[in-house]
Image (tube, helix red, strand yellow):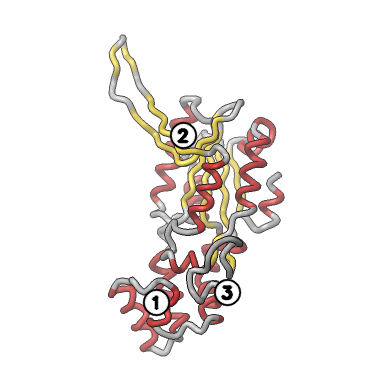
Amino acid sequence: MFDELTDKGFDIAATNHARAILTHEFAPELAQLIAILSGFHISMADLIGGGGGESGQTQRLRHALNATGWRKHRFHVQTIVDGIERDGISHEVDHVNFARPGALALEVEWNNKDPFFDRDLENFQRLHALSAISVGIIVTRGASLQDGMRGRITDWLRARDLSSESDLVRLGIGDRTARQKAKVAAQTARGTAFHEAFANAFTADKFGPSTTHWAKLEDRVRRGVGNPCPLLLVGLPMSILTDAAPEGDAPRSLFDT
């Protein structure tokens, strides 16, 4: 079933027999998840207009998961010693699917600081050790998306003749800090085209190497963070970025064409 995702450029990795567990024990839930991921797209207008954060279409992924039973859940662990309750510990997971064979825990790390991966993986480790979850799943920006983000933004802005700060207002991102504007101005003063200068500053500021993306996640899992919990790692590919908003969405600006 994973072929549908890999054929579309998704990065997929599994540890500790997670692939076999999902395929044989959680086939309906896996098919549901693959269908949601396969149909997920982010418009360039939402990506840039939303400042790279979890606004607009990125939230659609969470809404789709919630609507199909992958809901936020707080696991509370209470220790009792000789009849005396000790302080409890809670582990909150953004998306949990309680299926017949067990529970699947899923976190979406679109654009956080990369230490959030440690939090997620360590939570999964503890919950699995307590038999509270069967598999932990993390969805993040894939390698192709991380590596190609700047070029994709540059090309999209060039095609729309973005050439000044005033044009950004038309895109709905006029509210930027003095530091962000100064970074773009410094590059244009050295002869860089405005659309390139903006793309350089935007990706460095919003999607830098210390944010959550495939390479950072893969590095942690290779070092054994989260073991022995079975893990499924999913990297969103460049192909999720689209020029136009999905059908039924009102255009955000003249750039939504």
Q: Residue 7, percent across and down? A: 70, 56
Q: Residue 29, percent across and down? A: 63, 37
> Residue under circle 3?
257
Q: Residue 113, percent across and down? A: 39, 54
For the N terminus, give its image quadrant: top right
Q: Nearer the viewer, residue 120 or 216?
A: 120
Instruction: Tell me the residue at 41%/84% (across/down).
Output: 164
Q: Amino acid at mark 1?
A: Val
Q: CA distance from mark 1 to mark 3?
A: 16 Å
The 10 Å Cα crowd at callout 2, few under 14, some 14 to 19, many 20 or more, is: many
For the C terminus, give its image quadrant: bottom right
Instruction: Tell me the residue at 32%/14% (across/down).
Output: 81
Q: Are marks 1 and 3 in contact (CB under 8 Å)?
A: no
> Residue under circle 2?
125
Q: Single out the mark in the foreground, 2 or 1.
A: 1
Looking at the image, is 217 positioned above or below residue 49? above
The 10 Å Cα crowd at callout 3, few under 14, some 14 to 19, many 20 or more, is: few
Q: Earlier in the sequence, mark 2 or mark 1?
A: 2
Is 9 positioned to the left or the right of 66 in the image? Answer: right
Q: What kind of element bears circle 3? A: loop
Q: Earlier in the sequence, mark 2 or mark 3?
A: 2
> Residue under circle 1?
169
Q: Amino acid at mark 3?
A: Thr
Instruction: Tell me the residue at 41%/33% (across/down).
Output: 74
Q: CA distance from mark 2 to mark 3?
A: 45 Å
Looking at the image, is 85 positioned above or below residue 147? above
